[in-house]
Amino acid sequence: MKYVDEFRDPEVAKKLLARIERDAAHLDRDLKFMEVCGGHTHTIYRYGLENLLPDNIDFLHGPGCPVCVIPMGRVDDALWLAQQDDVLLATFGDMMRVPGSEESLLHARARGCDVQFVYSPLDALKLAQDNPDKKVVFFAVGFETTAPSTAVTLATAKAKNVTNFSVFSNHVTIRPPLEAIVNGGETEVDGFIGPGHVSTIVGTTAFDFLPDNYNLPVAVAGFEPLDILQAVDMLITQFTSGDVAAGKARVDNQYARVVRTGGNDAALKLMEKVFTIRDTFEWRGLGWLEHSGMGISEEYADFDAEKIFDVPGRRVADPKACECGSVLTGRIKPWQCRVFGTACTPATPIGTCMVSPEGACAAYYNFGRLDRAATAGLSSNPAA
């Protein structure tokens, strides 16, 4: 398949790995690279890339999973909306399984709440048009990747005057959590594998703050195995060439077949019109971050669920046994969580990282990736 098979070529992979091995041998210390996007995490562990790299190169998992970063209180707010009279709550399928403090949206649906999963926000708008007796609320989540589709939907709703449609916005921006991790002092990061999907919208310049302010290299990458390996090679090269030592770290664009320097101007302009940046927004594992969430702008206030309904704004601490926050910020690996693979599995998730198809815990569980030393010679079956 064009644009897939060529990025899974084993011979090219061997050449890339040989170059990485050669260059890594010249490093004077171990390097830890954070893959920001959960899609990267799944590629890494599906194809076993972490075990192919030299021992002095390690991956850390970042806060780029849109479902994973939503705090439990916002899920409870969505559950509250689903229980209001004549409300039909629509959201993506993985959000339906995310646990709130007492239940998930899937459980709420099972006991009679009108909750439906959709593939896009435009599907939710269609539900509103088809059900004029219902107040349809779209529970929106995601980074700048999915925010444009919500913006298009809101613009369409306004143009068509669909008065029974609103959005409960939980869209977030990518820069604040990365700055929080770098400034937090709890996670040692030497470079970032930049999120390809977000970068198609915001461009590579959105990550210039990492080399400019912190001298941390970035390689924006695609999602195939060779994309990840080439991004690792690009990052290592910035160290072996002396660029990082000279304070000249930069953003490299491995995903040039899709990502442009300035991103998608039309999408950015529409988002600026439809959304407004909140003063603060709560993140799982990171707490309250300034200017990190997207609310609905005044121009589209008639479609803002938080203005239409008296949403309680619940704030709920994660279960003490759940360490999703530490996984999302690269402080621990999923297998280091006390409940990983026992009380917490994809069938019985305690935290969001085990629910989402982009969650690091789900990647480790589904592909049997545990501690290298602990699993040496074992089956890749997570139950082994």
Image (spheres, rainbow, N blue to C red):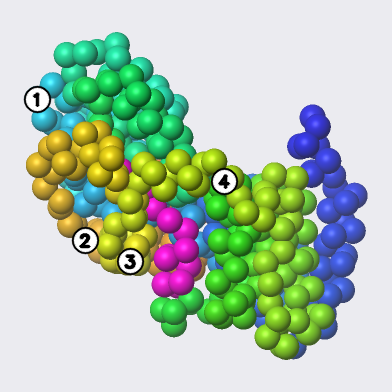
| Lower position in the chain sequence, tag 2 or tag 3 | 3
Q: Marks 3 and 4, how far apart in space? A: 26 Å
Disc 1 secondary structure class:
loop
Which residue is labeled 1 in the image? 85
- For the residue marked with disc 3, what is the amino acid? Leu
User: Which numbered tag is attached to residue 317?
Assistant: 2
Residue 183 on image: x %, y %: 44, 79
Marks 1 and 4, Cα distance to the nearest angstrom? 40 Å
Q: CA distance from mark 2 to mark 4?
A: 38 Å
Of discs 3 and 4, which sits in the foreground? Answer: 4
Say which residue label 3 marks. Answer: 289
* CB-based contact (under 8 Å), mark 2 and mark 3: no
Q: Which residues are magenta?
A: 168-181
Look at the image and say whether residue 178 sits in the magenta stretch.
Answer: yes
Q: What amino acid type should be assigned to the residue bearing mark 4?
A: Asp
Pointer 4: residues within 10 angstroms few (<14), some, or many (20+)?
few
Name the residue at 60% across, 77% down. Answer: 212
Pick the residue in front: 239 or 155: 155
In this orientation, does residue 105 appear? no
Describe the element under mark 4 as helix, strand or loop.
helix
Whether residue 219 is situated above or below residue 105 in the rendered picture:
below
> At 48% from the left edge and 45% from the top edge, which residue is drawn?
269
Q: Nearer the viewer, mark 2 or mark 3?
A: 3
